[in-house]
Amino acid sequence: MALLVTDAPRFTAGDAARLAEQLFGVRGRAEVLPSERDQNFLVWANQEVRPTGVLKIANAGEQREVLEYQNEVIRRLAERCPELRFPRIPGEIARVQSGGAAYFARLLSWVPGECLANIAPHSDEVLSSLGRALGQIDRALDGFSHPAAHRDLHWDIRHAGLARTHLHLLPDARRRIVEAGFAAWERIDWQALRSGVIHGDANDYNVLVENGRVVSILDFGDSVHTAIVCDLAIAIAYVMLGKSDPIAAARCVVEAYLAEYPLTPAEVDGLFTLAIARLCLSVCYSAHHANTAPQNEYLGVTDAPAWALLEQLEEFPADWPRDVFRRACSRRQSNLPAGRAQHLGPSLSLSYQRPLHITRGWRQRLFSADGRGYLDCVNNVTHVGHCHPRVLEAAAAQARELNTNTRYLHENLVEYLERLTAMLPPPLSMVYLVCSGSEANELALRLARAHTGRDQVIVVDAAYHGNSNALIDLSPYKFNGPGGRGKPAHVHVVPQPDVYRGTDYAGTVRAAARQADGLAAFFCESALSCAGQIILPPGYLREAFAGVREAGGVCVADEVQTGFGRAGSHFWMFETQGVVPDIVTLGKPIGNGHPMGAVITTPEIAASFANGMEYFNTFGGNPVSCAVGLAVLDVIRDEGLQENARTTGEYLLAGLKDLAGRHAIVGDARGQGLFVGIELVRDRETKEPAGQEATAIVEAMKDRGVLLSTDGPFHNVIKIKPPMVFSRADADGVVGGLEKVLR
Ligand code: PMP
């Protein structure tokens, strides 16, 4: 199976015009078209504006039967696909001589239409029509056979392995990607795939479009008897090129194809692997041709976009495309919004005007059922990245062995307590393990009350500390919000220390502490999240804590959102304020999505709490949770995520500040590490909040594949607190996207 590039005929346009007249009676002129191993000429009859036909001169090695076979395929499709256009074949196959060699020549009538390659962007409609057209072709070819179809073609994905001989031509990083593609190809069970004759080359130079709809798929030079699903695999391999959402584009084609020509489950499952194998063999042959036929530019047209795609696909969970295609072939479409509304208590809204159906997560990205990928800029729970393999493996391995409560001795518990407390300054050394941020704050409140023997609490305006009865009472965000019952008597609210809006600072805490009649605690996030991504002014907590302690209260740092290295410069956000709290509460990132929380306090406060009543928590501190917690700490350390939060956070903030300099609506850009926000205002003088605008921007960014959300009392702060594997390229994507949306 030689690559027949060197056997390509070498006729000139003048020769072609002469042959067209001599052999087929078309008198006029000819113009050369690109081809891999044959020669094709567009032929115009005299005086005609449109071409009359295409003169095809096959390479010297081509057999007459193969050309007869191709002609038969064309005739069959012309007959059986009434919605599509195929060439007529006016004359016989002729034999022509040149330079001592003989070649076969044919004339096919010209088919009008624009190449899909020249159309941008590819709308869902055009992609669906491609799927429909190819499905109709494969349906029409079902049952067709011809002896010449059983030929060995190096572009046939069944023979993709042959391209491996060129692997050594690729640089290391790229070779690794292609080797993985071939390894997956090797696992294909060809017996499970139906065989038949296929078109074999539905690349976008062979697809013709008119009025936004595919009207023809031409060039039967690669038509072959192989696994039928390869036809669709080849089409989607090319469709994915140059797309920001390649899998969504492929899904459009697949869904429409399946409506015309159903595939078996095994074929659907193999589809993506076959498409990747096609790209892998294509880049291998490009590398080979770059060495042997550098003058033929047509041979390399796919190379750069194919590499870009193969590298882009590296960011996706490997088997997610298969899930998307499976869903595309499932006729059973469930109505998730209705199902949810019917049985889920109605107090929880969905994000976005058109809610997302997310089916996969990987690192800093989420993937939806319809094949789109999203950069997740808001999930600070999946701290070390969605579905981190080390965390998953730790959970699974321990779950296979044992999961039980903490009334038995276990290494995981002790090791986790040691590792966690080692991250905290003394005297914070006593830990209670719980299952959520709410549980942590709820217990912190009990500890503070037990220790002080008092009840009252100071909280910061617009704060949220959790969903229990006691914590709703400590959350102005809730008790002053819709459905709230206002501030309870035992709670004192101080204004949020908002540097941008110039509201009062720490003195208000001292004043509230003096005023309180029996102060138990001051609850404060170490950087304010729900209140609008506010970074505390320097010295705020030092002064506030002093005022609280003077009044006999304890200081609780709610690090549920901000802990575990997000601050970048420090492991805990409170450290940026140079203070040591009496109680620290942890949640969200602690288990990377596994339900965990923790309260850490001083031996003195822990002793006050040990009044005889046991504190039992069924799930808190179980061996699986501790294994997960340990894995999270390991990953943060081993992957340098705190340092990444520092450098990438600084880079992101610089980009956002730059944006603020150019767009008046961005009143403020602020942040610490990967805890960042921009505040939108209608007027920089009055700082009138631009809440609706913020919501519209969040929606527009979602359509661009970036997930953000709003916060703050006026919902005008866009928050950015992504998984800590967030990269500079991601930061560029966010800033660049905002730039476009703001324009
Ligand atoms: N504290 C803060 C600062 C929070 O943001 C949250 C949750 N948003 C909680 C506590 C409560 O945590 P959970 O939802 O895990 O109960």
Image (cartoon, helix red, strand yellow):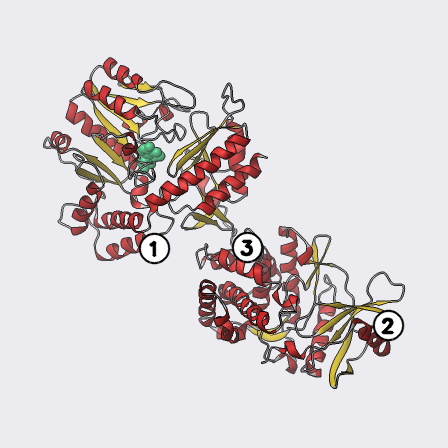
Disc number placed over residue 26 in the picture, else none: 2
Q: Residue pushed farthest bottom?
A: 100
Q: Is residue 523 above or below residue 328?
A: above
Against 522, residue 89 (above or below) is below
Can residue 237 be seen in this snapshot?
no
Which amino acid does the dot numbered 3 rest on? Pro
Residue 461: image x %, image y %? 35, 22
Answer with left or right where residue 573 lies relative to residue 499.
left
Q: Secondary structure at mark 3?
A: helix
Residue 590 image-quadrant placement:
top left
Q: Which residue is farthest left?
A: 612
Q: Position of residue 385 (x, y in %)?
A: 37, 48
Residue reaching furthest to the top:
515
Task: Name the image quarter holding residue 242.
Answer: bottom right
Residue designated by label 1: 389
* Mark 2 or mark 3: whose residue is earlier in sequence: 2
**Between 592 and 189, which is closer to the camera in this rendering?**
592
Is any atom of residue 651 visible in this view? yes
Name the side, left or right, on which 66 lies relative to 566. Answer: right
* Rendered image quadrant of residue 138: bottom right
Distance of mark 2 from mark 1, alpha carbons?
Answer: 66 Å
What amino acid does circle 1 point to? Answer: Pro
